[in-house]
Amino acid sequence: MVERFLEQTSFTSQEDFIRNLKIRVPENFNFGYDVVDAWAAEQPNKKALLWTNDKGEARQFTFADMKRYTDMTASYFQSLGIGRGDMVMLILKRRYEFWFSIIALHKLGATVIPATHLLTKKDIVYRCNAADIKAIVAAGEKVILDHIAEAMPQCPTVERLVSVGPETAEGFDDFHRGIEQAAPFERPKHANTNDDISLMYFTSGTTGEPKMVAHDFTYPLGHIVTGCVWHNLTEESLHLTIADTGWGKAVWGKLYGQWFAGANIFVYDHEKFTPHDILQKIHDYRVTSLCAPPTIFRFLIHEDLTKYDLSSLQYCTIAGEALNPTVFDTFKQLTGISLMEGFGQTETTLTIATMPWMKPKPGSMGLPNPQYDVDLIDAEGRSVEAGEQGQIVIRTTNGKPLGLFKEYYRDAERTREAWHDGIYYTGDVAWKDEDGYFWFVGRADDVIKSSGYRIGPFEVESALMTHPAVVECAITGVPDEIRGQVVKATVVLAKEYRDRAGDELVKELQNHVKRVTAPYKYPRVIEFVDELPKTISGKIRRVEIRQNDRK
């Protein structure tokens, strides 16, 4: 399958990758027809999606199944009046109906808006009115349906509500009854052009309302590198990415690149994350490939891994936040597997990564994906030298690279702020070493300025994480009259250290940081907490810690 879109399908070095990565972009590309249906035609019995849940249920779908169900879903959606350009929000958690729905909407040329189930009434009202959402398809759980119903009086553009069960409510259509009764699907003559918006995410910044990140129909092609190269997948792979479908990482790791590679996508539909359950699923189903944020791996390495047969696991990738070297080293020691780090944003596909032919440097993101013209620049726009910090940018003077977002929908000002004069500014700060490897420092807003020094949160967090007392930590800056800011550490302690939380342990951790990294970077303030505030994707919300400190 991927041979249709890549001139060369395997690479042996970074030089080979840079020279020979060429992705073909068909006219009017549609992932539903050109990938899902193509697999169904060529290998109908090929395994596509293995769905399991925390109730012990499991379903294996082939590509023939996916074609049949997505056609049924597309026909059902057509009967609801949904077509090209219509905005449809999916609040489906990890339900298999998400895959039915997103592919069906692609086939119709509609715009998919994946959303988290944690949205409140206010969030739903904002999204519906900001994007003129026409329909909402949701998991049938009372709290989700109630929030949607409460929002509807203030959402005049919404015409149809659909529940996939197990519950439904007044005003909601029954998804499964609808697809079962649907007429045979007739493919639209002109479903889409490459420039149409296929996918849109609401992404929160540090200020203001969420931005609407709009991607065109070529966006899935940008993820060929994600699945076929970085994840190192083959047609025999059973791949697990731990992500809720409301987060952009779901299409990174549970859809596009994986099905280009012909891999079987493993889904674990669960309510509460526990390391034991994840390890047991890998053990039971013989998962071969795992991708997860650092938070997941931080907890996995504190489990007794000898209780599980992880011999099927061949390859692991990590993204979402920078990887602390101590997590890399411990996981490698316990499993023999190197964690291959990658970096990207909701606005992009994989931008910087440690690829299979590269020797990973623990804590480094790796090298730029040649799909993008990546650079590091200072405040004056100068490309920085090795060892200097700069903002990660993508140069677009030769045109929009495959996988980069189209725009912030209906917000030309925000689009211009982030993307102007042929440069897209990521807002992330990094430095690169003599070998060209990129090392994450932090969001531009997170960098701490103390007594004239610029201190990146990640380097202090990495130092703290090498102490056995620390399971997780977040570094932020707190205002200080003399120094401008001082470094604060918010720390989650290992179980055996919790009864030692106090001044003595504070001093021990401070001295530890002074020994491991430059003494001026040590945290002058340390707070012990039971858990860190996080996004649904597992990223630490340092902005929330700073807000609480100001209060």
Image (spheres, rainbow, N blue to C red):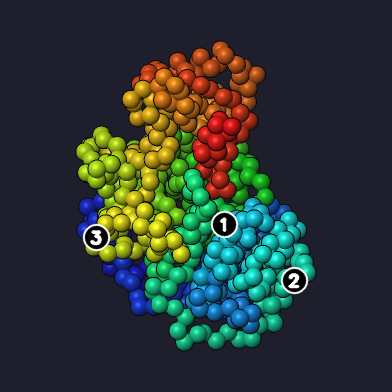
Q: Which mark is residue 308?
A: none
Element under label 3? loop
Of the 4 image quadrants, the one containing the N terminus is bottom left
Q: Label 2 neighbourhood size at 10 Å, few (<14), some (14-19), many (20+)?
A: few
Q: Amino acid at mark 3?
A: Thr
Task: Determine crowd level at label 3: few under 14, some 14-19, many 20+ residues with C-alpha closer than 10 A.
Answer: few
Kind of residue indicated by mark 2: Gly
Question: The C terminus is located in which quarter?
Answer: top right
- Check the image and report above or below for 513 versus 102: above
Q: Nearer the viewer, residue 390 or 234?
A: 390
Look at discs 3 and 1 and give the one toward the viewer: 3
Number of numbered markers: 3
As helix, strand or loop, the secondary structure at mark 2 comes to loop
* Residue 124: x %, y % from top left: 63, 59
Q: Where in the figure is residue 114, as x and y percent of width and height?
A: 56, 61
* Residues at circles 3 and 1 in contact by the CB criterion of under 8 Å: no
Q: Which residue is mark 2?
A: 171
Which residue, given by chain and number where applicable, does mark 1 sit on?
Answer: 246
Question: In the rendered image of this protein, does residue 27 appear above or below residue 152?
Answer: below
Name the residue nearer the viewer: 443 or 150.
150
Distance from disc 1 to disc 2, alpha carbons, whole Å, reads 23 Å
Cβ–Cβ below 8 Å for labels 2 and 3?
Answer: no
Which quarter of the figure has residue 406?
bottom left
Residue 221's x, y, as percent?
38, 66
Q: N-terminal of the two: label 1 or label 2? A: 2
Quadrant hosting residue 141:
bottom right
Q: Going by the image, does 60 lie left or right of 153?
A: left
Locate residue 197 relative to residue 395 in the image: left or right: right
Name the residue rendered at 47%, 31% in the picture: 476
Residue extending furthest toward the top: 504
Pick whichever of labels 3 and 1 is earlier in the sequence. Answer: 1
